[in-house]
Image (cartoon, rainbow, N blue to C red):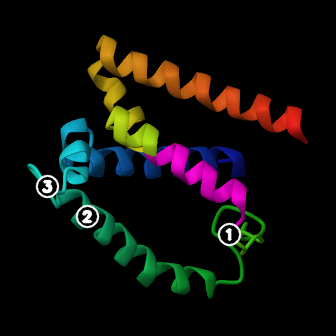
Amino acid sequence: MSQSMKQLLAALAAGALFGFGLGLSQMIDPAKVTNFLDLLGSWDPSLAFVMAGGLLVNALLTPLILKQKRPLLAEFFRLPTKAEVDKRLVIGGVVFGVGWGLAGYCPGPMITSLSFADSDILTVVIAFVVGTFAARWVLHRIS
C-alpha cells in the first residue's frame, strides 16, 4: 500500500472517530452550544466536559507523540511557528465566536450534522463556505 493511501486511510479513520465522538456526545445538536452560552438561563455545561476531555487526551498524548523521531505517516512534524497573539488572531476569534454562537455550530459538528441533510444545516454550511472564501478574498485584498 502506498504512503499516500496510508495517509488517506489514517485521515479517514481519524475523521470518522472525531465524527463518532461528536455524535455520541450530542455536540451536533446546536441547542447544546446555545445552552452552554446561556449562562443565566438554561445553562448546559456538557460542552465544557467534552472540551475538557479533548484537552486532557491532547495534553497527555502530544508530548509522547512528539518524542518520536518523526510521525508514522509523514516525513516530519508540522508544528505552528507563530507564538504571538496579534490583532488578526483576536478579531478572527471574535468573529468565529459570534458565528458559532449565532449558528450553534462549530465547524466539526457542522460537518458532522450534514448527515441530517436538512435545509437548516445546508444553509449553515453554505454560509460557512461563503464566509471562508470572503475572508480569503479580504485578506488577499489587504495584503
Which residue sits furthest right?
143
Relative horizontal placement of residue 27, taking residue 74 as reference (left or right)? left
Relative horizontal placement of residue 141, taking residue 32 as reference (left or right)? right
| Whole-percent x, y for residue 137 in the image | 78, 28
Magenta region, residue range: 85-97
Mark 3 nearby-residue class (10 Å; few <14, some 14–19, many ≥20): few
Q: Is residue 29 visible?
A: no
For marks 1 and 3, give the CA distance.
Answer: 30 Å
Q: Nearer the viewer, mark 3 or mark 2?
A: 3
Relative horizontal placement of residue 92, taking residue 39 as reference (left or right)? right
Q: Is residue 12 within the magenta segment?
A: no
| Whole-percent x, y for residue 62 in the image | 52, 79
**Frontmost residue, 132 versus 64:** 132
Quadrant where the C terminus is found in the figure: top right
Q: Which residue is mark 3?
A: 40
**Frontmost residue, 136 versus 70:** 136
Q: Secondary structure at mark 3?
A: loop
Q: Is residue 12 visible?
A: yes
Q: Residue at x 36, y 51 (%)?
A: 17
**Frontmost residue, 92 versus 66:** 92
For marks 2 and 1, give the CA distance.
Answer: 24 Å
For marks 3 and 2, give the CA distance.
Answer: 16 Å
Q: Residue at x 71, y 54 (%)?
A: 88
Q: Residue at x 72, y 64 (%)?
A: 86
| Whole-percent x, y for residue 30 in the image | 25, 37
Task: Please name the amino acid that badge 1 sits on.
Answer: Val
Task: Please name the amino acid that badge 3 sits on.
Answer: Leu
**Frontmost residue, 15 versus 100:** 100
Q: Which residue is mark 2?
A: 48
Q: Going from the N terminus, do you reach mark 3 or mark 2 first?
A: 3
Q: Going from the N terminus, do you reach mark 2 or mark 1 first?
A: 2
